[in-house]
Image (cartoon, coloured by chain):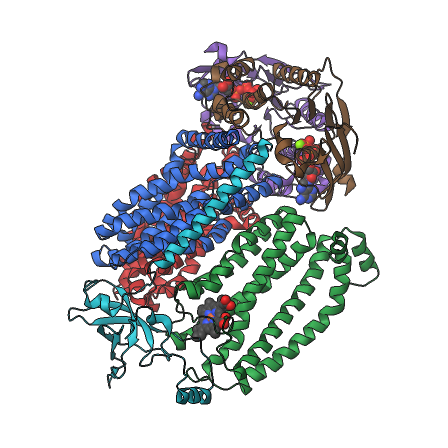
Chain colours: A green, B cyan, C brown, D purple, E blue, F red
Amino acid sequence: MFKWIHKFGSPPFVYGVSKAISPWIGVASLILFAWGLYMGLVKAPPDYEQGEVYRIIYVHVPAAWMSMFVYVVMAISSAIFIIWRLKLADVVAESSALIGASFTFLALVTGSIWGRPTWGTWWEWDARLTSELVLLFLYLGYMALRAAIEHPQSAARAAAILAIVGVINIPIIHFSVEWWNSLHQPATITRADGPKMHISMLIPLFIMLGAFQLYYFHHLLVKMRAGMLMRDRRARWVSERVEGGRL
Amino acid sequence: MTPKRKQRLILVSLMLFGCAAAVGLIITAFKQNLEHFHSPADVVAGAVSPGTRFRLGGMVVDGSVVRATDSVNVQFDLTDNRDVVTVQFDDILPDLFREGQGIVAKGQLNNDGDFVASEVLAKHDENYMPPEVAAALEKAGQMPSTAATFGSKTLVDP
Amino acid sequence: MTEGALLQANDIITWRGETCVLDGVSLNVSHGDVVQIVGPNGSGKTTLLRTLAGLALADEGEVYWQGAALHTLRAEFQNELLYLGHKPGISGVLTPEQNLAAFLQLRHAVPDQNALLEALHALGLGERLALPCRWLSAGQQRRVALARLALEPVTLWILDEPLNALDVNGVEWVVSQIETHAANGGAVVFTTHQTMPFNTVQPIRFKLSDAVLGS
Amino acid sequence: MTEGALLQANDIITWRGETCVLDGVSLNVSHGDVVQIVGPNGSGKTTLLRTLAGLALADEGEVYWQGAALHTLRAEFQNELLYLGHKPGISGVLTPEQNLAAFLQLRHAVPDQNALLEALHALGLGERLALPCRWLSAGQQRRVALARLALEPVTLWILDEPLNALDVNGVEWVVSQIETHAANGGAVVFTTHQTMPFNTVQPIRFKLSDAVLGS
Amino acid sequence: MKANTELFRVFSTVLRREMRVSFASWGEGLNPLLFFVMVVTLFPLGVGPEAKQLAAIAPGVIWVCALLAMLMSLDGLFASDHRDGTLEQWVLSGQPLSLIALAKVCSHWLRTGLPLVLMSPLLGVLMNLPAATLSTLAISLLLGTFILSLVGAIGAALTLTVKQGGVLLALLVLPLSVPVLIFGAGAVQAVAEQRSALGQLSLLAAGVMAALALAPIGIAAALRVGVASGD
Amino acid sequence: MKANTELFRVFSTVLRREMRVSFASWGEGLNPLLFFVMVVTLFPLGVGPEAKQLAAIAPGVIWVCALLAMLMSLDGLFASDHRDGTLEQWVLSGQPLSLIALAKVCSHWLRTGLPLVLMSPLLGVLMNLPAATLSTLAISLLLGTFILSLVGAIGAALTLTVKQGGVLLALLVLPLSVPVLIFGAGAVQAVAEQRSALGQLSLLAAGVMAALALAPIGIAAALRVGVASGD
Ligand code: HEM
Ligand SMILES: Nc1ncnc2c1ncn2[C@@H]1O[C@H](COP(=O)(O)OP(=O)(O)OP(=O)(O)O)[C@@H](O)[C@H]1O
Ligand SMILES: Nc1ncnc2c1ncn2[C@@H]1O[C@H](COP(=O)(O)OP(=O)(O)OP(=O)(O)O)[C@@H](O)[C@H]1O
Ligand SMILES: [Mg+2]
Ligand SMILES: [Mg+2]
């Protein structure tokens, strides 16, 4: 078991796999984006109450979900790094921060734009909105902390601690709409009794979600390769690859 | 058990106790009214004195909306199915402001007992569907309640 | 793994920036050993001592305490360790007595007040007991920190340039402490650029070469 | 007033709290003199050196520079003085080069960049030119400060334990600098608890007794 | 039993040492209090002393100022211990570092948070807060400042080796303290608007318990990392 | 002529060194700016984001925050130079200490005051200040923060050897900075009420000139005393 993890967690192996599959994932994500946007912006019907405005959902919701998903990935790999000292896990966490922050920013911006016409305000210090803003700050803090500590090993561990501490924010984001009867609407899709959204509107949403996911994985794989090269720059497998021109 | 182990055990159990206490307190908190707003019934009962800024939550009474012809000024009634408070507002209302819809208004009572709002927020519910589907559901009498939960927690069952 | 070694370092490799400061260092310390790490300025002595104490993480290699990896029995190891580095942990606003008492109380339920005063007197600080440490001279501050050698009965001492700023008497005091400690079966790892007038022990010299060349 | 003395201290008395640290100290330093202040820890060496440099004020007594009281010609005196204390004025965030350049520029309109690099290389810091000083080892930091000895052509050096943390090579470098300086007619006042391998000069030893007794 | 008293001894040793340090440098202790009082009293000067306007912004102003005062004082929480090597000694003491950290935080709160709490009713009066809100103000600050001490200490420990880490500290601690601010000011606001503040206060109390249970572990882990990176 | 260039060299040497230091530890430079932005944006959080109310208190809030940001950054102005011995070296450099002090203050202002000034119009917009007041806000801050840097540096130098002298610093500097706050906020208020702000602004300018002329001497004297007391 441990041997197995070791093989599949070893940088040279991961580097090779990543190099082989990341272009395909990138292409797939592009296709899904085009398809999802077409379905969402053109094919899907307008909403009975909101009319056309609601179409911002096709960016807002995937971005919001990804913002949380990426953070969870970051926190879990940070925990793995702290507990088992697996350096690859740290590379995953490091590579996720920036894109996670971008998703969060996107969710905040699209939410704000959507909130103005529907709620009557760009911003309210409501539980969902505030906790999502906190998430953005956590991402920024993570990156800033990494950058600020000069000793790379210490930087990695300190940032990992921060990522783990901050993970309490994720359930707060998700359940805030139930706990605090907030301005933000309760869950439409992620609910026990099934989605409260018409199927013709729902399908494009899932396509967009797929596109966002694949885009994240593509980005992650590419950044991880750079991270692994940097970290293992003194290792033999890197010099072999450099000499062989197989970066 | 070595003393070190024992120490660790004590520390861990203290930690667990702390977490449990936190969970207990959170549950108590949610039993309390964490709403940021008063209901019309509170206002009529005199819970808030004029001049105090506060939020008022409730449902817009059907047919009560009166718009001024020469300005954006608008007046409507807000209810929790028990009492009614008149609200005045002179700014642009959000798209989702409808009669029968829950809203929250920020402002203060004037001396006549009317609520002068400086901001009105409307909330959208979790349902998304095309207009045709909505019409069909309406016909079948299966339309989910449109009163978004924003004000509904203060609503008294009629 | 050498049988019977108290402290053992295996193939420690530490990089700082693009410099390999410790380039595969292995070291054994047993009961009664007095080990002096020698090497020019910047050769990695401080880095090595901090790694042995478990303060700094090595990039590769592992330190063992009585046969088990350090990080698996941190508390047990630390209970047997006294580490004094370049910054000896003396607060300038506290008096020598307060400073020492805080350290002793962390180890023993009831610190021996008499022994404490005795040690401070032996170190020539008898007239300075009530003075905040920031008013003391450089050598006097160092003496306050060194008083712990006489007060905390642990097995392993790791001392980084303990003689800094000490006068001749101070140096002799440290030497005699080390000799007594080794005679009692304790172990000492230390560095210094000065020559130490040892009488009863012959320190094992462990040489580090200049880090720059290893880069 | 002694004729021809470069630096002269007359009957310096300094109290710290209830302790008389300097109890009427008088001292003469002339061109070519190398004066070593000796005394046990806490005997007032640092206090004396700071008084000579004009950093600390004595309760009584006066320091003269070329016959005139220090405070009457502060700038002229300071233009001829290099003082290196326990804290040598090296900022941890700047590189060795930046640190030194700032000092040189305060003295000379155009500091000699070549000489600067040469001195740093001679002190074994050639590979650390771009490293912020806080990453340097204790001895390397001290070396950066000492590089000024080779770079600022002034008459009087006042050095408080310049050998702290230095290795054998470092000590030799300092010794040779002091010897050259004295041979060129400069004057040096310094303290150290270590023995220094002087070849061409014989330092004048000026003894301070333990301050505690003077209280 | 033995292990129990042993733990208590570690805690009280560190607490006593810290109290001694802060007595010796009394200025440090007064710092945040003075800041708090000053800023709150500066506001009427800058904003204009209209009674009604003041009362409207008072809960927010007082709470923001308290938060800032805590944040400021956190910046140097471990700095001097790090500089003089005490932190290294604590890490190597063989005692639970999280307990030492907790003692350190408690002493920090006793000399910064508690004075704020005691002073706050007076400032509330100065800012024309209705008398009914004063006790809520004090209680919310009591709970809130303690959370801030605990959470802030994680930030302070994480930024240990960052030169002048104040910005970073603020960046790290603020997201976690925004909820405290919202519930704290919200509790006072609620009473001012004649609603019950019990909900907000129990959330703050929950925060205290959770932070007490979890923060010391975070602080200890961060301190280990900070000390390891040396310098 | 010669003496002239010599003085300029001293000034620019110290200024350059200080700029290097602050580049190397970028966090330090950002500290006050971030503090400023943070506090100003925290206010809507605590007070409630209502546009009209915000605009009414905005000049005061922005000015108070700027004053605090400056005060905070002053606390450590000479601390690290004192700790590592650079200050001793400056005192002994044989160059006019007041000039060195002035360079130090200028570099302090460049990396703390100036960013505040540049950021202030944006914050004004955030706080719903009328557009016409923004330039006055910036100009009043430009003059005011420079006075605060100069006057504050005297305080920082006086409290050099006081451990954690922040309290003392604040006590010393505040009385002198309250007038700056009143005129500064007053100028913005005046424009908001469509009166002329010329009176307040010229008073601030007078303050700058006076402080430029006198403060460096005070700072130098205080530094000498601080260094002499050693430790
Ligand atoms: C700045 C404003 C906003 C922010 C920060 C925000 C944030 C979020 C977040 C974090 C989620 C994911 C929650 C989860 O999966 O647990 C979410 C979901 C969602 N948001 Fe928003 N939102 C904002 C505005 C809006 C507006 C104005 C609307 C529409 C009226 C809206 C509609 C939705 C919907 C439909 C979902 C999916 C709910 C589900 O899980 O089924 N959001 N938002
Ligand atoms: N980031 C870095 N990049 C390059 N070299 C570094 C870096 N950080 C530290 N170093 C080098 O690592 C070495 C650390 O050495 P260490 O402090 O262990 O020396 P030492 O043997 O204790 O020296 P001393 O006798 O002066 O105390 C120094 O040579 C230092 O210059
Ligand atoms: N406030 C005070 N009360 C009493 N004694 C004091 C006070 N301040 C300083 N001292 C004493 O004054 C002396 C100062 O000595 P100084 O630092 O000059 O010694 P030194 O000869 O340089 O010693 P070292 O060799 O350790 O560097 C010390 O003995 C110190 O304890
Ligand atoms: Mg060393
Ligand atoms: Mg000395």
**Residue A200: horizontal and vertical position, in percent?**
54, 84
**Residue E225: horizontal and vertical position, in percent?**
60, 43
Residue F111 position (above or below residue D136)? below
Q: Residue furthest right?
A: A244
Residue C165 position (above or below residue B119)? above
Residue A217 position (above or below residue F78)? below
Name the residue at 65% across, 31% down.
Answer: C77
Does residue B23 show up?
Answer: yes
Q: Is residue D48 left or right of residue B140?
A: right
**Residue F189: horizontal and vertical position, in percent?**
28, 61
Q: Is residue B45 left or right of residue B101?
A: left
Does residue E57 show up?
Answer: no
Q: Quadrant of the C terminus of chain B?
A: bottom left
Residue in front for this viewpoint, C209 or C97: C97
Q: Quadrant of the N terminus of chain B?
A: top right
Residue in front for this viewpoint, C41 or C88: C88
Name the residue at 58% across, 76% down.
Answer: A206
